[in-house]
Amino acid sequence: MTSNVRNAKDLYAAFARGDVPAILAMCDPDLQWSQAEGHPYQPNGAPWSGPQAVLEKLFKRIAAEWDSFEANVHAFHDAGDFVVAEGRYTGIYKPSSMRLDAQMCHVLCFRNGKLFRFQQYVDTAQLQAVMVMH
């Protein structure tokens, strides 16, 4: 296992235990984080810059709006500076009480051992259906 795969596994382990400070510490200050186009939190897919933006625009919203939100990774693929993580998101969106079980894929790029770029791919139609406000 390369150090970047180990770094990716450490990131997901920190997310699983809700350790956001550990996740942010594993990020490069110049982090570029992109949600999938069509994601309700960033529909245009434009990247957020820096760990603080990800904390404010993603992690705080997940904590406030979701019960039992998990990123369950089933496979890690080593591509040098890049790691591809395949899995599923699960959870319950509190405002709609609807359950999510969506396929996802992440492409993570590391620089000097820190997460430098993150690109999410997910079933955004399912996210939108779960997150629709009634």
Image (cartoon, rainbow, N blue to C red):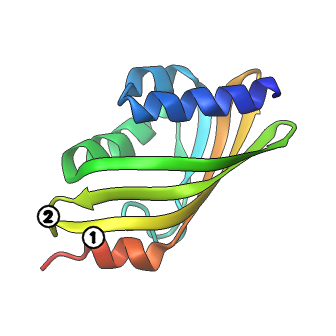
Image vertical order of residue 15 relative to residue 79, above or below: above
Residue 36's spot in the image, x, y percent? 54, 64
Residue occupying the far right of the picture:
80
Tell me the amino acid under the disc marked 1.
Met
In three-dimensional space, the C-alpha distance between marks 2 and 1, rounded to whole angstroms, equals 8 Å
Name which residue lies at 24% across and 52% down: 66
- Quarter of the picture containing the N terminus is top right
Give the mark, 2 or 1, whose residue is nearer the N terminus.
2
- Report if the CB atoms under discs 2 and 1 are less than 8 Å apart: yes
Image vertical order of residue 126 relative to residue 59, above or below: below
> In the picture, residue 7 is in which quadrant?
top right
Q: From the viewer's perspective, tell me whether residue 40 is left or right of residue 110.
A: left
Q: Closest to the observer: 27 or 89?
A: 89
Image vertical order of residue 58 relative to residue 31, above or below: below
Residue under pointer 2 = 95
Q: Closest to the observer: 53 or 112?
A: 112
